[in-house]
Amino acid sequence: MDLLYRTVDLHCQANNSAHHTSDISTEELIIRRGQSFLLNLELPRPFNPNTDQLHFTVKTGSRASEDLGTQSAFGIPESHVTRSPGAKAKWRAELDTTSSPALGRVTLAVTPPADAPVGNYYLTMERGDKEASLGRLVVLFNPWCPEDWVYLPEEEERQEYVLNEHGVIYKGTNKYISSVPWDYGQFDEDIMDICMKILDVNPKYLRDPTDDVSARCNPIYVSRVVSAMINSFDDAGVLVGCWGKPDRRGVPPSMWSGSVEILKQWRRNGCHSVKYGQCWVFAGVMCTVMRCLGIPCRVVTNYQSAHDTDKSLTVDVYYSDFGVRPKESKDTIWNFHVWVEAWMKRPDLEGEGGNYDGWQVLDPTPQEKSKGVFCCGPASVKAILDGHTHLKYDSPFVYAEVNADVIDWLLMFNDPKQQLCSDTKRVGQNISTKSIGSNKRQNITATYKAREGTELERNTFKHAITRDYSLEGHARHKISVNREGLGTEAEEEEEQENAEGGRSIGNGEITVEENEEENAVVPTAPLPQMVVMQIEEASTPISGQDVHLKVTLSSEDRVPRSLSLRVNAQTMLYTGVPAANVLTKIEEHTLQPGRALSVAVVIPFSVYGEHLFDCDSMNISVLATDQNHPKLVYLAENNIVLQDPPISITVKGVARLYHQLEVDVAFSNPIQETLQNCSFHVSGSGLLINPVEASLPDLKPGRRIRLVLAFTPYRIGKKILVVDFDCSTFRDVKASVTIDVQLH
């Protein structure tokens, strides 16, 4: 039999190391586009580079085509390679200097183009009518290649945003920023294959696999596919969203500590969606997939994040005359919202010089549809900063998330609604991401908008609100501009004007009356601001303990003011939706001129404890009404997050590869009631092949429980062990420890 070759060596370990993929595998060839890899062939006869020829073909997808860039012919010499006139994504090969042609030993340096579609490829060698397989390889995006659209110039950024498998995700509220560890695990076993599977079951592939595989050369296209496939609303996506109480068939979103369990469960269940996720879970899983595919990615948290359903760039918040939020508005302000940013070029956007290159917002949480699909982005962060809300994809929605104006309304019984205040600064606070090389928080608010209160920020807002959104596919909308130059967006059947103005604690800006027949908002004369009111913590709020607050009122008026204070406390979902009313009280006080008044507010754990279990925070609102002038109403509110009790983690000894290591985990009951249904959940890529679940006995008041866990680390480097404690009273308390696994 005339063999085309005797042996082939793909040098998986050396090539993968050079391509920064050895953490994924050293047994399968995984390369990055735009970068050469070495291939050794032992031929059955000597090879003469001047007279002999070697021909190869590489293919991806079921209907590979040179014109679509999913197939390429290449060889030695290049001049004898026959290609289609319209061939795209051309692979090339050169004879490496380490070859020994006279002995039939040929080493080729093969280079996939920087615009090759990512995915699984099959490499064959041909001569005449004979063909022989050389093996399978995987091609990924390449942030190290200047010609690749995902090129990231700084090595420390590539280490963080492509290669780092661990991170933190920020939660809480603007005033109570908390962080949770997240194990991305993009190089864990099977994760790359799962990421490829995600691409292969997306609806665009199922409709037209040929076109879809060809489009995988473009990180803009791939990122939109991934954004849609992380949620399950339109497809066989990875995660089912749940913002209420999850049923017993699923895992509460707060329990997850990483992406690996979720992705493996999705594939193990035949690509059926995993229950359940919320925004930080969706973002964490998407970051894993993007980094695995080679697209630089980071997780970003926006505090006081607006969900603007009608693209008006304003959000209405309603209160009753008792201070309670009486209804859920279509628009909401989330305590926090988490999305991802991916780094890529944007040649599809207007302008020259790469004005919109760089970080792009992508949001896999299913909130609003984008071109008929529940996905969001990529929206250029630079476009958001400049107020260019006409640019694709989903720029108006993202702009509103970080910079919408807020109007607080008071709804009174048998009385028109009254505007309490108009706030231009509330939305988009402390936009945060993990710092490069550390777990410190980096504030990136300035990359999204100019400093609040500046003329530049207001001018950008006016520019943003007057953009033609029909360019984004919203042809039913029209734009109008009022005399001050502030644009408002309206449906064809309804038009509403919104007053521009700064935050006012009280009636210092404008009050309004509503004409129900025309549904128009008519300004009335502004009322003077007489009282300043704020809510402060008397001590750090800790879950399991009574919450102590104080309300401080002051006035520079020359006469005493008789005030009726209506204090209300509600447990809140992080999406800004009230869950339960836990305290309502009314007090009468007299505010003396020139003197501050301090009113203590205590919320007992016995009152709020059972209602906080599935909630993320507690909203305290105080409505003060001047009894002599009932139209003078003042509002103050504070959204607090209670600190969880601590978990102790102690690592015993030095962590070494393939050597057993012990960790001691402990939790103490801080309240005066028995904790039931207690459990520990422990996970960590590179440390535990599978997560450990440990059911625990009931924990009486003041008692401590320990878990001694033994495991064998299977990968070197700094790894994160994450511990989750869950019980009848405290939902998913988390702690983590970094373990540096040594080779010897």
Image (cartoon, helix red, strand yellow):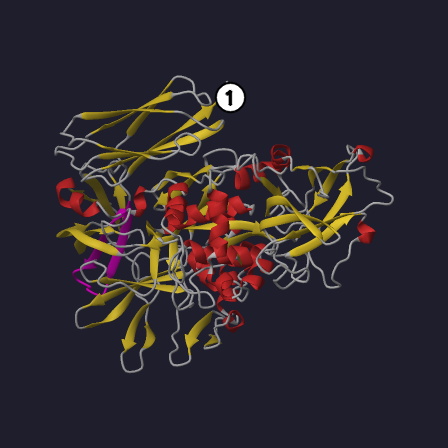
* Residue placed under numbered mark 1 in the picture: 743
Which quadrant: the N terminus? top right
Magenta residue check for 627: yes
Quarter holding residue 235? bottom left
User: Percent position (x, y) of residue 523?
Assistant: 34, 73
User: Magenta segment, which residues?
Assistant: 616-640
User: Percent position (x, y) of residue 356?
Assistant: 60, 56
Vertical arrangement, residue 135 with respect to residue 216, above or below: above
- Is 585 situated left or right of 430 in this image? left
Vertical arrangement, residue 253 with respect to residue 168, above or below: below
Residue at (32% x, 25% y) in the render: 649
Q: Secondary structure at mark 1?
A: loop
Q: The disc labelled 1 sits on which kind of residue?
A: Leu
Q: Farthest front residue?
A: 1
Residue at (84% x, 42% y) in the render: 49
How many residues crowd mark 1 within 10 Å: few (<14), some (14–19), many (20+)?
few
Residue at (49% x, 46% y) in the render: 193
Quarter holding residue 505? bottom left
Q: Nearer the viewer, residue 119 or 159?
A: 119
Residue at (22% x, 42% y) in the render: 549
Vertical arrangement, residue 612 with respect to residue 20, above or below: below
Quarter holding residue 20? top right
Q: Nearer the viewer, residue 555 or 637?
A: 637
Would residue 92 be seen by someone viewing this image from the given angle? yes
Magenta portion: prevailing SS class = strand
Magenta residue check for 39: no
- Is 24 situated left or right of 52 in this image? left
Q: How many marks?
A: 1
Q: Farthest right residue?
A: 50
Would residue 461 be seen by someone viewing this image from the given angle? no
User: Percent position (x, y) of residue 362?
Assistant: 48, 54
